[in-house]
Image: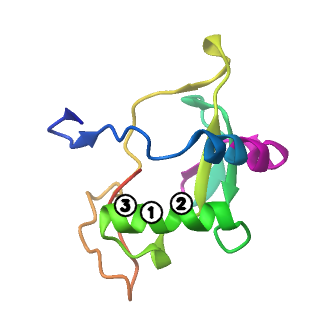
Amino acid sequence: SEVCIAPSVTLIRGFLSHDECEHLIRAARPKLQASVVLRDGELAIAKYRTSWTAWLSGEKDTVVARIDRRISALTGLNMSSAEELQIGYYMAGNRGRYEPHFDWGTEEGVARDFEHNRDPGARLATL
């Protein structure tokens, strides 16, 4: 169901099964590290993002591979240029937060060149 028109935000109920969610939690738990952002070309911890992150690869996990195929079918996007599946862990209270921010574009402006045979530019979608 559509949550917002601009920007486009859609809620997809049942996209992951309960078993898939449990699998992702189990697979991510030992890989969790303090979340970082790209700042001045370097990975850094940011005050606006106080969480833990793990990355899961479909090349190493058949459940993640199945989810990747489902994402591709839903979005119509080729997953060859996609990031690995990112799992975020946020704790209760103020110990885990993610404030609104832009993670696309550059100081000069938003990159709108989405050619995958060169620098891919901005993120096309987040699911």
The stretch of residues the image draws in magenta is: 25-40
Q: Quadrant of residue 96?
A: top right
Give the alpha-carbon distance from disc 2 to disc 3, as whole Å: 19 Å
Q: Which mark is residue 123?
A: 3
* Percent x, y of residue 48: 54, 29
- In this figure, which residue is indicated by the disc labeled 2? 67
Identify the secondary structure beneath mark 1: helix
Q: CA distance from mark 1 to mark 2?
A: 5 Å
| Vertical order, 90 against 65 (above or below) | above
Q: In which quadrant is the N terminus drawn?
A: top left
Label 1 sits on residue? 70
- Asked whether residue 122 appears in the rendered view, the answer is no
Picture coordinates of residue 3, whole percent (x, y): 23, 31
**Mark 1 belongs to which amino acid?**
Arg
- Seen at 36% across and 67% down, the residue is 73
Which amino acid type is marked by label 3? Arg
Labels 2 & 3 near each other (Cβ < 8 A)? no
Instruction: Provide the secondary structure element on which disc 3 rests.
Output: loop
**Taking 52 as reference, is 124 above or below it?**
below
Side (left or right) of 46 relative to 123: right
